[in-house]
Image: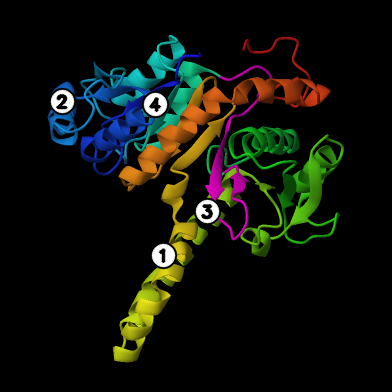
Amino acid sequence: MPNPPRIVVDAMGGDFGPRINVPAAVTAAERGVDIILVGDEDAIRAELDKTRAPDRDRNLSIDIVHAPEVVGMEEKPSDALRKKKDSSIMVCCRLVKQGRADGLVSAGNSGATVAAAMFTIGRIRGVERPALAGIMPTEKDPIVLIDVGANVDSKPFHLAQYGLMADVLATHVLRIPRPRVGLLSIGEEEGKGNTVTKEAFDLLKGSHLNFIGNVEGRDIFTGEVNVIVCDGFVGNVALKVSEGVAKSFGKILKGELKRDFISKLGTLFLLPTLTRFARTLDYAEYGGAPLLGVKGSTIVCHGASNVKAITSAIMMGARYVRNKANDHIIELLEAHGDLSRYGRSGRKNKKSESS
């Protein structure tokens, strides 16, 4: 029987630190994941003592690695990587690099996490630029929006690689058979978009993917497409707008349901439906955004993540490792010839990163 995935958790990451990350890690350990908690050892042990009550299984696979420094949410990633070599994020990445863990989860400074993963753990063979894949709920299957912030400027072949990597995520981790892949543009017609989008369209059209062409912003939540490809600037804006709309809608709905006695009475009958609706919109169902293209698995979580979100992120990271997603990415890139061998200039590289 194969060993369970070992996921290292940045216990100090996010707005709430160990108070959220430690209980989430314990829950994931109860579900069969080996855990390494990284951060202030005293703070972690104190939270473990509160979380692991006497009636819970104490034979869980949870190790602690002390990290004396923390990267602040507002710190510049380049400064954090240069000045804080022993931060919890950097220690997490080194553990993956050394093979002591299969992947990491962090709700800390997202820029620092992405940079540390790219430069400490390293890219998988054939990937030019790793990208963040936001997983968003729809009325049907979840949708993968890539990139949501790792790269604000992308070349056409970068976008094509994003599509290939996200196809693997959708197929092998989210279990969506033959995912439909679309390119985010300003119109559905083939000639729409800027030069980068048009060239990316041709690359995706010539790929082995189930490419359905251009899609617009209104198509994100229809469930008719499973993967939407865009650069990190556009993707991050789309993600934040979606979060804002969902939050505002929730507040408006809550206010209307409390407006008068009839509304409150109706809420009792609507409660099961409203609960299902809230679960559909809940980002915590998926936990975080996988950074596709780096060795191991890296899941970047929202700073305000709750226990459910961090637990979901850990389980997704474990699923990513268990299903050998990176091996599938390498295979798919190699099957697409030039898309796995481009260099930074857009020309073919003679050398490629090792797997």
Judge whether 263 appears above or below 180 on screen: below
SS at mark 4 in the image: loop
Task: Return the residue nearer the eye: 342 or 323.
Answer: 323
Say which of 51 and 208 sits in front. Answer: 51
Sequence order check: which comes first, mark 2 or mark 1? Answer: 2
Region in magenta: 123-147
Q: Earlier in the sequence, mark 3 or mark 1?
A: 3
Q: Image height check: is 76 above or below 179? A: above
Residue 256: image quadrant is bottom left
Closer to the eye: label 4 or 2: 4
Query: Of residues 239 and 221, which is closer to you in this image?
Result: 221
**How far apart, in angstroms, are the residues tagged by discs 3 and 1?**
23 Å
| Three-letter amino acid code at the position of disc 3 | Leu
- The residue depicted at 80 percent of the width and 40 percent of the height is 204
Quarter the C terminus occupies: top right
Task: Give the structural element (helix, strand or loop) at label 3.
Answer: helix
The percent position of residue 262, horizontal first and vertical second, equals: 34, 90
Report crowding for label 3: few under 14, some 14 to 19, many 20 or more residues within 10 A (C-alpha). some
The reply to whether dot 4 and dot 3 touch (C-beta < 8 Å) is: no
- Precedes in sequence: disc 4 or disc 3: 4
Please tell me which of labels 3 and 2 falls first in the chain: 2
* Image depth: mark 4 or mark 3 in front: 4
Residue count near mark 2 (Cα–Cα under 10 Å), binned few <14, some 14–19, many ≥20: some
How crowded pointer 4 is (Cα within 10 Å; few <14, some 14-19, many 20+) is rated as some
Residue at image mark 3: 239
Which tag is nearer the camera, tag 3 or tag 2?
2
- Which residue position is annotated with label 2? 45
Disc on the earlier residue, 4 or 1: 4
Along the horizontal axis of the image, is 314 left or right of 69?
Answer: right
Q: Left of 16 or right of it: where is 77?
A: right
Residue carrying label 4: 32
**Which one is in front, 69 or 300?**
300
